[in-house]
Image (spheres, rainbow, N blue to C red):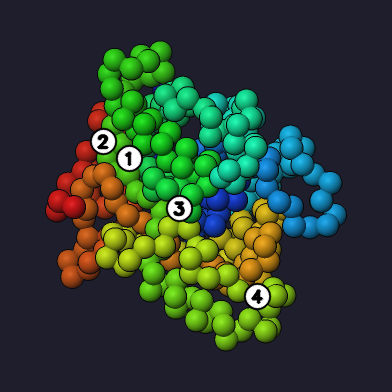
Amino acid sequence: MTELSSRRLLLVHAHPDDEAINNGATMARYAAEGVRVTLVTCTRGEQGEVIPPALAHLSGDDLGEYRLVELGAAMRELGVRDARSLGGAGRYQDSGMMGVPENDGPRSFWRADVDEAAAHLVEVIREVRPQVLVTYDPDGGYGHPDHIQAHRVAMRAADLAAEPDFRTDLGEPWAIAKIYWNRVPRSVAEEGFARLKDVLDELPFPAAATVDDVPGVVDDQVVTTEIDGTAQSAAKAAAMRAHATQIEVDGPWFALSNRLAQPLFPVEYYELVRGERTAAPGSARESDLFAGITTATSGSATSEGGAR
């Protein structure tokens, strides 16, 4: 068996680009610290709207293949070497926004059997044996069907991977010590948009988005953990820029295909939903996703520290 890194982080996302926007600084920071960072992307993002006119001809499978190339470039910017597609590239297709005909496509991720899709992720979990999993909340952050389904699959896979009798052909059981959902404190989002208002006239974007356009915004007290990725902000911006079909970056600001400007957050926030919360003395929040984890390389993942 290949020797494992002492710390292992698994992230589950719906489409290429979601990882850079939500977790780019976190991924770059931990990769630089020698953590094994594994990304599983559930679709190729075939329904994404293309920003650059020179690439406007891309759609469907052609766009999906192109977005995987962009994802590879983004991973190089973040220093991440292990990026995979759930069940293999193209097994599940982008379902589009909620309520569109693509939701009902035969390969739509939204229509996938959760246990069947989760089994593909169980195989990854039992191979990589991550102590930490990061994914979306039950609403997927903002109600996109693929994000909701990614949440369901990730949480189900975490449960199934720990069951000794489930699919023994997929490897030895493994219990993930800590599970986090992506979050943004409302105060942070509001402060970011206040700064954006002061410089919007200098940006190439015609208008600003709003706090409600940011996925995962919650009241501040919901947030349990913050990862300071300020030193990795350039890597995060570069990774986002690599997703050129989907994102336009200008300094600490960016826009999606709607061209509404948003802040690029170098500090990334999480809600611990499974595992023991371990904050430093005098701090209300954790500053490390691995805080309190004691098992390094084998056996069932365990943790210590104050109860959440």
Task: Tell me whether circle 2 and circle 1 mark residues in contact (CB < 8 Å).
Answer: yes
Q: Report the amino acid beneath label 4.
A: Ala
Q: Closer to the N terminus: mark 4 or mark 1? A: 1
Q: Report the amino acid beneath label 3.
A: Gly
Q: Report the amino acid beneath label 2.
A: Ala
Q: Which mark is residue 141?
A: 3
Quadrant location of the N terminus in the rendered image: top left
Where is mark 1, residue-wise? Answer: 131
Residue 274 higher or lower than 173, as above or below: below
Q: Which mark is residue 182?
A: none
Q: Estimate the x, y position of residue 270 in percent, counting from the top left.
A: 36, 56
Q: Residue at x 62, y 71 (%)?
A: 261
Q: Residue at x 42, y 41 (%)?
A: 151
Say which element carries label 3.
loop
Q: Residue at x 38, y 19 (%)?
A: 171
- Viewer-side label of 3, 1: 3
